[in-house]
Image: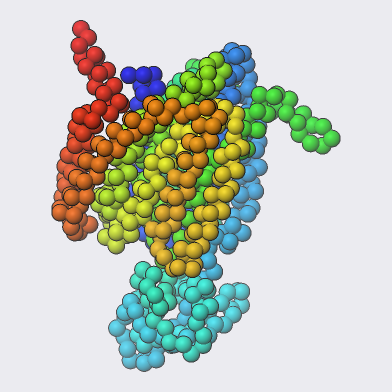
Amino acid sequence: MSSLHRKSLIATATIFCCRFTGLLREMTYTALFGATGALDAFLTAFRLPNMLRDIFAEGALSQSFTSVMSKVKEKEGDEQAWTMAHRVISQLTALMVCIVVVGVLLTGVLMQWLYPEKIAVELQLSDPLVQREVTDTQAVYQGTTARLDGGKTAHFLVEAPLKGVSRESCVRAQALNKVHVGDQVLLSVGRGGRAGVLHVEYRSFMDLATDLCRIMWPFILLASLSAICMGVMNVFCIFGLPNLASAAFNLTTIGVGLFVGWWIDPHFGPDALYGFAVAVLCGGLAQVLVQLPKLRKLGYRPHWDIALTWRRGLPRFSDDRVRLVWNLMLPGMIAAGITQVNVFVNNTFALFLPDGSVTALTSAFHLWQLPVALFGVAIGMVVLPDVSRLSVSSSKQDISLRLAEALQFMAFFAVPSALVLGLWGQEIVSLFYQRLRFDTQASVLCGSVLSAYSLGLLGYAGMKVLQPVFMALERPWAPAFLAVVTCCISIGLNYLYVHVLGLGVQWLAFTTSCITTINFLFFFIYLGRLLGSMSLRVLVPGLLRIAAAALVLGVFCYTVRECYFEGFVRWSFWWRLATLALAGAVAGLLYLIAAYFIRVPELTMFVGALSRRLRRP
């Protein structure tokens, strides 16, 4: 087994702990709050600082820092590498404090821009003797009036009282643009989305989202410091602890959130989400503290060294190595954030869809990210310092062979993962999320979103492997340019699906799959031109063997879904767990048997290494 495979498996094991605890965090959210407007508000509020974390800290900053520090350590020694690290950390801290202050001040404006305008609803019974509450009722629109507080109220004459409607209930202003005074409409308080129905929401959660976002903005500072710690340890070939630090974030968020949320509201109503917002900050702090003891053993001694000089009123870098980190980071920040920007754009468009759409999109995305992180991110994490060192002392052919090896290793796991998530998406969502307030209807919606995401899993994982290579080769601007183009395509497609065709949240996930696949193909072709080739003679035969083994798996998964999974979301939890575990074990065994007989290189290598280890005395 090669060094790449061994290090990748170590990173994969620790990333699994991180992602599994992250899944537990999402399960806690959905179980307590369900697919509701309140949880949509929390996830939207967290999306802003978390998006910056994914793009800035864990993406471009960590990769550019790791690449430059690896080269400095190789050429100039450990002492100069630590000097550079001190200066980057000092500059980063100052920058993040400024971003947090600006973010807190602008949160109100951002939320008003993200959330669709909503108008309060006032209902008047046409027959005062009718008392039975219903979820749908005929109504006559009587117009809109302005209130003293600057808001608006829409008035309807209804045939029967609507369930749960109060003074906080509202309708979306966009929907009322198509209705004229005197028009008869059908009002509904169920999950909307049906044609010709005016959906009444229980309340507008924009104010809640604004408050939660202001509380969570400092998380970007803590996450950035944690990313720098992770980059330092990756330079020293330590891949386990940084990912376990993320597990500490998830577990702290769950524990503190449950305690503070219960203290605020024992029934876990919308106000309990303030407790989970505080827990996000505690989790970010835990993520940094877990890594500090190991950093001290490696030689890190914190001190302030901002390494800036002022000329004519403008700051100037006094260290060229630090300047290189930030120069690489700027285009890398754009390129690494392709998917995260698309997720944020999807989140914004999902706010115009029925309540629960943001929750379905976010929950499915976390399940989709699990195999991507296990195989794509883990392998990319190992590839970056390796390629950085190879770019100093080896030929382009050596880099090309290393990338072909990495892509083939990634595909061995990513292809079957995409098939399982695509064919068993609804069943997987039901098993993980369906409990308490997350009902069967939410499972069906979220499962369809996960199936749409699965179409882009291979491209997303491959992108995570190849994207750091541009940092190592110091060619970050091509991916950055592509990021801008694909982001525009994503916005156009989402607008078409939501505002023109009136399609559901599944199509937002489909857009992300398309964009990530396009990005991967561009990365692959462009790197082939930079390196002279991508070692296709090594890569293609291995991929064809993996595809043949995956075909056997796909036939089995489709047959099981059609013959045995009917009504799965209505089964008891333990029956769902036992059935899916058994089916998953058989599916995995079939894939491995098929891969062994087809002689997939990764499995043959692993079996050979295992047999040699067993033969040792």
Residue extending farthest right: 312
Image position of 139 with respect to 307: above or below = below
Where is residue 579 drawn, in percent x and y?
16, 47
Image position of 198 (left or right of 20)? right
Residue 398 in view, yes or no: yes
Where is residue 355 drawn, in percent x and y?
41, 64
User: Which of 305 and 500 lies nearest the eye of the viewer?
Assistant: 500
Image position of 130 (left or right of 69)? left
Image position of 18 (left or right of 231)? left
Image position of 199 with respect to 390: above or below = below
Q: Residue at x 41, y 65 (%)?
A: 503
Q: Residue at x 25, y 52 (%)?
A: 427
Q: Residue at x 46, y 36 (%)?
A: 464
Image position of 410 with respect to 576: above or below = above
User: Which of 411 and 388 lies nearest the eye of the viewer?
Assistant: 411
The colour scheme applied to this rendered structure is rainbow
Image position of 277 (left or right of 552)? right
Q: Residue at x 36, y 53 (%)?
A: 452
Image position of 292 with respect to 78: above or below = below
Q: How many marks?
A: 0
Q: Quadrant of residue 358?
A: bottom left
